[in-house]
Amino acid sequence: MKMQRIANALLSLPLCLSMASVVWGGANVSGKVTLSGLAPKPKPISMVAEPGCAKMYATPLTTEDTIVGQGGALKNVVVYISAGAPDEATPPSQPVVITQKGCRFTPHVVAMQVNQELQVVNQDSTSHNIHPLPTSNREWNKAQPPGTPAVSETFARPEIIPVKCNIHPWMRTYFAVLKTSHYSVTGDDGSFTLPNLPPGKYTLTAWHETFGTQTQEIAVTLNEATPINFVFKAK
Ligand SMILES: [Cu+2]
């Protein structure tokens, strides 16, 4: 009987571990971002002005300013700790990479830390241009002909920066420059996870290019992992 009890305990151990969201030193804060109401439909993009881009697509690419999946899942929302966590002293050594491919920026929204290296790559056989439009950082504007090395830059101040390509007006991306390492950008299912957050009180902010900003005050404990949801309203 005793052996059986031990065996049962051993069997249930991996299950307990896999269900717990507690990780070393902190908890995982996770949830989902959705859009309520009638979602605007993505619109086809005309690339007739640039035959080199247009010929890559049998059916036109569509706009990415609102991408809604199953159950209203909202893609490309930056979810991050905006208050309560100390600012990161040093950026990660790993660069963040954004690629110009098929005459669009991929990913459409990219998050990075203050002073973290950003590399912009051109994989197309056409020239592109990267032109961030910041309000608190230094503005720059660089051409990137095909086959040239990655453009390497950093941003010194936290800010969400709209970015365009001056050559192709439909090309748009956003650089979310953050003081914190606790951030996530939602994918197709609208979900986010901020791993390893020490217990405490925080302000959690969700930003979307079309629907703006929402914040929530959250309390993180080691034992509790209540999913946190954001709901944006269709305009
Ligand atoms: Cu371009």
Image (cartoon, helix red, strand yellow):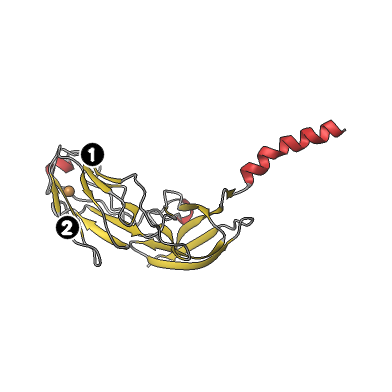
Q: CA distance from mark 2 to mark 1?
A: 34 Å
Q: Which disc number belongs to residue 140? A: 2
Q: Tell me the amino acid under the disc marked 2.
A: Trp
Crowd around label 2: few <14 · some 14–19 · many ≥20 (10 Å): few
Could you say which is closer to the camera, residue 101 or residue 122? 122
Image quadrant assignment for residue 40: bottom left
Q: Secondary structure at mark 2?
A: loop
Could you say which is closer to the camera, residue 154 or residue 150? 154
Task: From the top left corner, tell me how far across and down residue 123 is, in percent.
Answer: 21, 38
For residue 20, side relative to residue 167 (left or right) = right
Q: Is residue 37 visible?
A: no
Residue for badge 1: 58
For residue 157, side relative to residue 26 (left or right) = left
The numbered mark, 2 or 1, whose residue comes first in the sequence reads: 1
Task: From the top left corner, tell me how far across and down residue 56 is, in percent.
Answer: 20, 38
Image quadrant assignment for residue 221: bottom right
Crowd around label 1: few <14 · some 14–19 · many ≥20 (10 Å): few
Q: Which residue does the image show at 51% across and 60% down from the upper left?
A: 229
Task: From the top left corner, tell me how far across and down residue 191 is, in percent.
Answer: 47, 52
Q: Secondary structure at mark 1?
A: loop
Q: Are marks 2 and 1 in contact (CB under 8 Å)?
A: no
For residue 201, side relative to residue 179 (left or right) = right
Q: Is residue 177 visible?
A: yes
Q: Tell me the amino acid under the disc marked 1.
A: Ala
Could you say which is closer to the camera, residue 71 or residue 8? 8
* Numbered disc in front, either 2 or 1: 2
Q: Quadrant of the N terminus?
A: top right
Task: Give the residue furthest to the front.
Answer: 89
